[in-house]
Image (tube, rainbow, N blue to C red):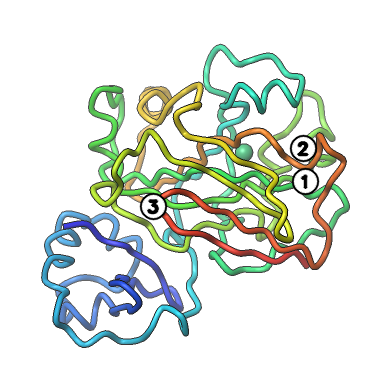
Amino acid sequence: MGFRLATIDDRAVLIDGDHWHDLAAASRGQLSGDPMEAIRRHVELHEFAAELGGRQPAGSVADASFGPPVPRPKNSFGIGLNYQAHADEADMELPKNPLVFTKFPSCIVGPTADVELRTETGDYEAELVVVIGDGGRDIRAESAWDHVVGLTIGQDISDRRLQFAAKPPHFDLGKSRDTYGPIGPALVSTDLIDDTTDLTVTCSINGEERQNGNTSQLIFDVPALIAYISAILTLEPGDVIFTGTPEGVGAMQGKYLAPGDEIVTTITGLGSMTNRCV
Ligand code: ZN
């Protein structure tokens, strides 16, 4: 059975409708409260999720303050220019191979975390984030989805000036300032998603919709990305891949993020995430 894994105070919780259960407590210690360990043991997580019904929940979702569902990925990847229309607006040539950069794990924060801008050239990028369940090397595209434990929403916040401060541009630093990687609210197991290849990705700033794309438009789809990256290095359980953003980023419209801005990011079946800029 599918699950929605989240974290509260760095403890793994399972969301069940409007309520949540503490994983370690509800399983009487059978499953670890460490979210990274919970992801590693996703087969047991599936089994346990089927037994959740009827248990007394620990709290309500409305009152909860969630952290990132994957708080400490060993590897965190970003993909540049993975939607045609975004490559067009950026006036950049389509990459012949996936354009992969590091989004340092230290920038990962939760679904309600403040984004600390620290510059006038901060920008938003709504993205589908893939979370690896079973790692491996040389994963074939045909079996790549079997290695995905679930999906979540991500914001690949980018400091454009910093991103292009060096030649060639250092995407990694420009996208890895502290708090520049909000993800959440939950890691949703893939069996709860009708069609993982047809998800609408939207982003609005202060209620104005700026991005509206669909993962069916990905140039390098999820299996292609996993095959490409795992041919180079071993993927680990809990590794995350920010799969790229559709068109409508702020830089091309001269609309950078400012303190007080509210970023709402929504993906079909995964819910939505609200982050405030400070
Ligand atoms: Zn991005």
Which residue shows up at 35% across the image and 76% down it?
18
Cβ–Cβ under 8 Å for marks 2 and 1: yes
Which residue carries the number 3 mark? 269
Count of numbered circles in the view: 3
Secondary structure, mark 1, is strand
Q: Is residue 123 above or below residue 139?
A: below
Secondary structure, mark 3, is loop
Q: Is mark 2 within 8 Å of ligand 1?
A: no
In the rendered structure, which amino acid carries the disc numbered 1? Asp
Q: Is residue 196 above or below residue 111?
A: above
Which residue carries the number 1 mark? 159
Which residue carries the number 2 mark? 163
Secondary structure, mark 2, is helix
Q: Is residue 54 above or below residue 211?
A: below
Q: Is residue 100 left or right of residue 61?
A: right
Which residue shows up at 56% across the image and 12% down it?
96
Spatial separation of the CA atoms under disc 3 and disc 1: 29 Å
Q: Earlier in the sequence, mark 3 or mark 2?
A: 2
Query: What percent of the width, then of the height, locates residue 49?
Result: 18, 66
In the rendered structure, which amino acid carries the disc numbered 2? Gln
Query: What percent of the width, then of the height, locates residue 30?
Result: 14, 74
